[in-house]
Amino acid sequence: MNQPVRRHLALAAVALAMLWAGPVSAQVPGGFDLITAAEAQQEAKAEREAPPVIRSRQVPAPRPNAPGIRVLTPNAPGTPVAAPLRIEVAFTPTPGTRIVPSTFRVLYGLLKIDLTERLRQHATVTESGVVVDRAVVPDGQHRLILQVADDQGNMAEQELRIRVGAAS
């Protein structure tokens, strides 16, 4: 490969790297900001400033008659995923009940920032679950709280922890 070709390839690589480092949603056709950089910064600050919590290993008992929420994708907790991401969640009603899709909510982190309407604009929410494609999330650790209720008023809540970024 001759010198001018190498130089052009190097410049192209630098240009691509600069584009990649810019705002992700600007380069993802059809993608949307599920969590903005400002929200992620607010949440990180709140987490740093929160008093330490004593954590126990006791798992809370499931509420009787509460519907089930199961995260299908991303399905490897703690494993970094790349943005934009696909989030797929399945709902399981208890016998004799039906999930009410309009009760589905998504809250972000300790501050419980309500992302529900932003997500609904880009998601499919049905009685059987939720599918979100091309959700742009900043690099880092994120905690989403998913909530849904059935037609009897039984509420379920499931935490989804996502680590976005390159594998270390």
Image (spheres, grey):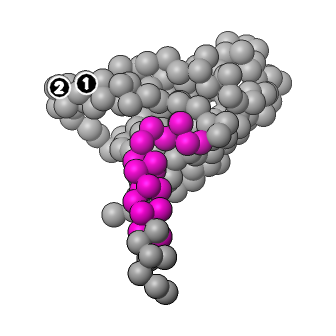
CB contact under 8 Å: marks 1 and 2: yes
Q: Which mark is residue 46?
A: 1
| Residue at the spot 73% in from the left edge and 34% down from the top edge | 129
Q: What stretch is highlighted in magenta?
A: 9-28
- Considering depth in this image, is 77 or 53 the residue closer to the camera? 77
- Quarter-of-image position of residue 113: top left
Q: Can residue 161 be seen in this view?
A: no
- 119 vs 162: above or below: above
Q: What element carries label 1?
A: helix
Q: Which residue was labeled with disc 2?
A: 49
Q: Which mark is residue 153?
A: none
Magenta-drawn stretch, dominant element (helix, strand or loop): helix
Between 160 and 135, the one nearer to me in the picture: 135
Element assignment for label 2: helix
CA–CA distance in space, label 1 to label 2: 5 Å
Indicate the position of residue 92 as horizontal and vertical percent values: 73, 35
| 3 with respect to 82 (left or right) | left
- Residue 114, image x and y in percent? 49, 17
Of all residues shown, which one is farthest toward the right?
Answer: 96
